[in-house]
Image (cartoon, rainbow, N blue to C red):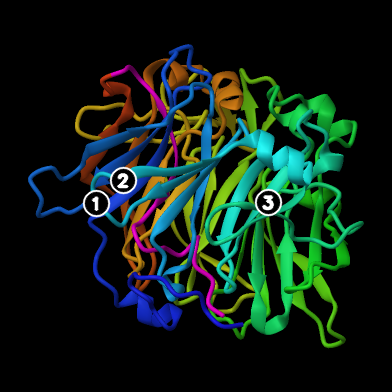
Amino acid sequence: MGCCKRTGPGYATPLEAMSGPKETLLYVNCIYNGTGRKKPDFLATVDVDPNSSTYSKVIHRLSMPYIGDELHHSGWNACSSCHGTKVLLVRRSGRVYVIDTQKNPKAPSLHKVVQSEDIVEKTGLAYPHTSHCLASGDIMISCLGDEDGNAKGNGFLLLDSEFNVKGRWEKPGHSPLFSYDFWYQPRHRTMIGSSLGAPATFTRGFNIQHVKDGLYARHLHVYSWPDGELKQTLDLGETGLTPLEMRFLHDPCKDTGYVGCAYTSNIVRFFKTEDGSWSHEVVISVKPLKVQNWILPELPGFITDILISLDDRFLYFINWLQGDIRQYNIEDPKNPVLVGQVYVGGLVRKGSPVVAVTEDGKTWQSDVPEIQGHQLRGGPNMIQLSLDGKRLYATNSLFSTWDRQFYPELVEKGSHMLQIDVDTMKGGLKINPNFFIDFGAEPDGPCMAHEMRYPGGDCTSDIWI
């Protein structure tokens, strides 16, 4: 299980990483696909150093060589614990872009393109999503289906250290029912993957009938690590529909983690039992709001992204439709406690036609502040936490077809990026009024913004072995 050799910060433990240097740059995946603007997606470099003259500005844009990618998630060729230097961008088109961030961190350059045709020909996989580096030097990427969008083609892609297609990770016949995110915990010889549904279903937008027809997933898949043998499938039931982003605790000795179930708006804890098998339980439930003037009588939270601070003290997650970001103390992993909450958008904000109704019949809408004279658009979707846990960054694009369906103004006027100050002593969240990135003011027109990465790794990319 030796660590791959790279040049980078190289933190031996999660707690050591918390004492690393304060972030000065962020890389943000920016999307034109689906907006009607025939421009290539790009990787934005954002200055997040308050002492810089270009603080809170996009200082570089690396455009992709093709139009229509829909940049989505990204990851490193090696974790910061193994010294990472190159970021991989995976996307709806099926291509994987390898970006060199070492030569000039402020102005990354394109290193290589792994074409979708090469991936399909050698593995049958398509729709790449989550990437993680492995101790061997390989890169592993979850794929959500085949080239036609069928879930039966999903599995896990391996790239070697030179970013060549190596094959599939899982053993033959051990592909999951559906795929999405994954995380591995080597000291427990386990990898667990979450699941969404077939790309042919979710890429067309959300249809409630698809949920009723069972076209969306509700399972976690437990694999032996690093062998790739499917050992157990956890059925989360009706309370665990669409388990998306998932995280183990960062302490590599721990055998517990959490997954956000979007449609049912529950946080599920998964854990190892005394007999060595894995089990699960709902530990947080976001109640749906009774509403007026919406497509359904109730509005779910719709949890899209979660993360855990490097000291394993706090869990953060997003309610994309209700519009709030939450902070929970998880020092008792079985009993999370809400300690921070802030509204930064959503469908029930003041001025929206959608109105929430309380049990006694009163109506209410959330207060969403303006930042530097800008009205916040859409709902929060992706978050990234500083290594020291004191600053939380948020963007607000989920996926272009879903953005257009639920927040059409966002597609028209573009995304934005916020920074939220975190109280790491008692808990608490507060928007920083001095930071605001308006992706609606881009030179090529308004664009969408999705995932964020720090040079050198962060709490959603790094796994300690």
Q: Quick check: is 221 in the magenta stretch?
A: no
| SS assignment for the magenta stretch, majority | loop
Is 330 left or right of 170, judged from the image as shown? left
Is mark 2 in CB contact (under 8 Å) with mark 3?
Answer: no
Task: Identify the amino acid type marked 1.
Answer: Asn
**Alpha carbon distance from label 1 to label 3:** 29 Å
Instruction: List the residue tagged with mark 3.
Output: 142
Query: How many angstroms separate mark 2 from mark 3 (CA)?
Result: 25 Å
Under mark 2, the amino acid is Pro
Q: Position of residue 163 (x, y in %)?
A: 55, 53
In the figure, is residue 310 to the left or right of 242? Answer: left
Number of numbered labels in the structure image: 3
**Which part of the image, by quadrant, shows the N terminus?**
bottom right
Determine crowd level at label 2: few under 14, some 14-19, many 20+ residues with C-alpha closer than 10 A.
Answer: many
Q: Residue at x 51, y 22 (%)?
A: 33
**Which label's residue is closer to the chain start, 2 or 3?**
2
Q: Position of residue 288 (x, y in %)?
A: 66, 40
Q: Quadrant of the C terminus?
A: bottom right
Which label number is shown at residue 108? 2
- Which residue carries the number 1 mark? 104
Residue type beneath disc 3: Ser
Whether residue 222 is visible, yes or no, is: yes
Q: Is residue 270 above or below residue 201?
A: below
- Say if mark 2 contacts mark 1, CB within 8 Å: yes
Query: Which region of the structure is painted magenta?
Result: 444-465
